[in-house]
Amino acid sequence: MKKKGKEKFGRGTVLLAEPFMVDPNFKRAVVLLCDNDKEAGTVGFVLNKPMQIEVDSLVADFPEFGATVYYGGPVANDTIHYLHNRGDLIPDCIEVAPGIFWGGDFDQIKFLISSQLILSSDIRFYVGYSGWSPGQLDDELRYGSWVLTAMDPNYLFKTKSEDLWSKVMEHKGENYTVIAQMPDNPNLN
């Protein structure tokens, strides 16, 4: 599936895996791009792959919280990252899309959680990240591996993970509403 032209992407762009992607890391993945640098490459997080672990059992001295950890991608699986909607309370974070922030002071996050000023509905934790070297994502877009769209905070905080790929694809409109209805495995129809 070849595409013509060069598509623009950057911080706040959402990548939707094309429906037949076989890479298990990105099958039906919704990836939010958080950084894009010509020399360093691109960084993002898979938004719709929850793991069977909670953050307080993964991070030592973390307050009891009960928030599910998500698989952010296949790079640096020994790291933890977080996206949140509390840029007003967390210093040193980066706004990646309207109302969505990446990172920030981890000790402050732990304090705010223990003070119940940040709830599990305000923050998502990720193990690892998705990364592309300079030019790699351009090549994947030319090949047709990804569909680009804009981020909506509801995708991160209000949509169930298992429904996210279909919902975001449907929100693209036009032909994408048909793609959104495609079964995960068309051979089982």
Image (cartoon, helix red, strand yellow):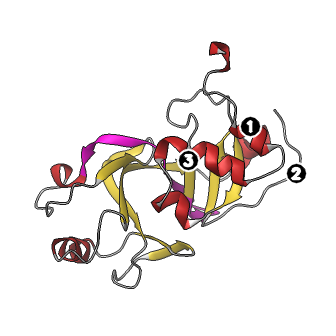
Q: Residue at x 46, y 61 (%)?
A: 157
| Residue beneath disc 1 | 179
Residue 188 within the segment the image draws in magenta: no
Q: Nearer the viewer, residue 11 or 120?
A: 120
Categorize mark 1 by other alpha carbons within 10 Å: few (<14), some (14-19), many (20+).
some
The first of marks 1 and 3 along the sequence is: 3
Per the rendering, the mark at residue 164 is 3
Identity of the residue furthest to the left in this view = 61
Magenta: predominant secondary structure element? strand
Image quarter (top left, top right, bottom left or bottom right) of the N terminus: top right
Give amino acid for label 1. Ile
Name the residue at 43% across, 73% down. Answer: 85
Evaluate whether residue 42 shows in this view: no
Considering depth in this image, is 162 or 126 the residue closer to the camera? 162
**Magenta span covers which residues?**
33-54
Q: Is 106 situated left or right of 173 in this image?
A: left
Image coords of residue 110 (percent x, y): 20, 71
Name the secondary structure under disc 1: helix
Q: How many numbered callouts?
A: 3
- Kind of element beneath mark 2: loop
Quarter of the image that includes the C terminus: top right
Q: Is residue 131 above or below residue 21?
A: below
User: CA–CA distance between discs 2 and 1?
Assistant: 22 Å
Judge depth for marks 2 and 3 and give the one in front: 3
Type of the residue with mark 2: Gly
Is 37 positioned to the left or the right of 178 in the image?
A: left
Do the residues bearing badges 2 and 3 touch, measured as CB atoms within 8 Å? no
Whether 34 is among the magenta residues is yes
Task: Return the residue at label 2.
Answer: 5
Counting residues from the N terminus, which is met first, the one under dot 2 or under dot 1?
Answer: 2
